[in-house]
Image (spheres, grey):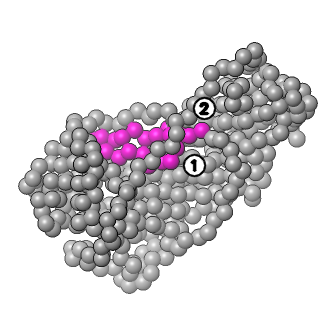
Amino acid sequence: ILSMGISHNFIFCFSQSPPPFSVTPPARPTTPLNSSMIVPPPRPASRPKLSAGKLGGINEISRSFSPTSVSSTSPPPVAPLARAESTSSIGSSASLSTATTPTIGTSRGPSPISLGSQDSLPVATAFTESVNAYFKGADPSKCIVKITGDMTMSFPSGIIKVFTSNPSPAVLSFRIRNTSKFEQILPNAQLVYSDPSQSDSNTKDFWMNMQTLTAYLKKLAEQNPSSSYYNVDILKYQVSSNGIQSTPLNLATYWKCSLTTTDIRVDYKYNPEAMVSPAVLSHVQILMPVDGGVTCMQSLPTAIWNAEQKKALWKLSEISEKSENGGSGSLRAKFDVSEGPTKPSTLAVQFVSEGSTLSGADVELVGTGYRLSLIKKRFATGRYMADC
């Protein structure tokens, strides 16, 4: 057990409980397609046929991820994106949310697309990945990691009129690149088709069931006629991982408990190797439950103590390679307790990174009739925890 001295202490002693901090419940867009299954249409003729052979590296691999249950906070959601060019927008499909992230761009209202438009139709795409990790002490071999992702497309409201006025609208086809890290891909079976005879393990081609897509967009428009865009879940995937090397932020916790005091240290280290390109981890929060009847807390850097929930909360603005010590540091706290010794608990961490993914997945449209007006990428924590 390491000795943990604290200098320049921040001391909080309590005579009454401060107001609890709260967490916004999870919110996730869904695509409730309930129409009957439709036989996949033939692949668009304008797209070249790929050589026969199975797509490698797209097999489901069973993984264990069952760390100790713990109440955790949630990362900030992605505010809807709007672009004046197409007024299409992508909202976050991450499973956790809390503080607000500034909106990027400005929507001008309903889409300017009109019947008979000869221009290519704009669509926006978002990749959202969730990294789940469980750290046990300082032993990297005991780290369990699971990374999942999903892809969402956003369509401007004006595109519905174009689709409904044309009995055979151009088929929307797209290709996902950098799929070699994917262990499994699960397309929306009612909307998306793929060609099984693809031999390139680093790309995967798909095309849309336009009849079902049109019907679903019309349903969304009926439910929310004032919206200028509509989001559709396209597919989900699981990314291969390599233990602690696949975690953007490595963690190790240490506890020293006695009848009257509890000392805690949390070491963290930014890991750029987990990312295709080093990205900033923002809105970092570390939540540590502490029992034993805490009467006083000293912490460095300053933590917030919630007496009602019996939890200490550290908030760090961001962590990156440009941070002090290359993104490595320690959180320390000493608690005076009246009902010790404290029982070590599981801490929960949250962060979010905008503009990149852990898998490096990307997308391009294939064929004519459509254009990508925006590609949004992000990753965030799911269940990201550590025990001593």
| Rendered location of residue 43, percent (x, y) | 27, 76
Q: Label 1, on which residue?
A: 382
Residue 74 covered by magenta stretch: yes
Residue type highlighted by circle 2 = Leu
State the SS at label 1.
Answer: strand
Q: Residue at x 60, y 32 (%)?
A: 316
Q: Quadrant of the C terminus?
A: top right
Of pointers 2 and 1, the one earlier in the residue sequence: 2
Q: Residues within 10 Å of mark 2 (few under 14, many from 20)?
A: few
Q: Residue at x 74, y 38 (%)?
A: 266
Q: Residue at x 65, y 31 (%)?
A: 314
Q: Label 2, on which residue?
A: 316
Q: Which residues are magenta?
A: 73-97
Of all residues, the one furthest to the bottom in this rendering is 52
| Rendered location of residue 39, percent (x, y) | 30, 76
- C-alpha span from label 2 to label 1: 18 Å
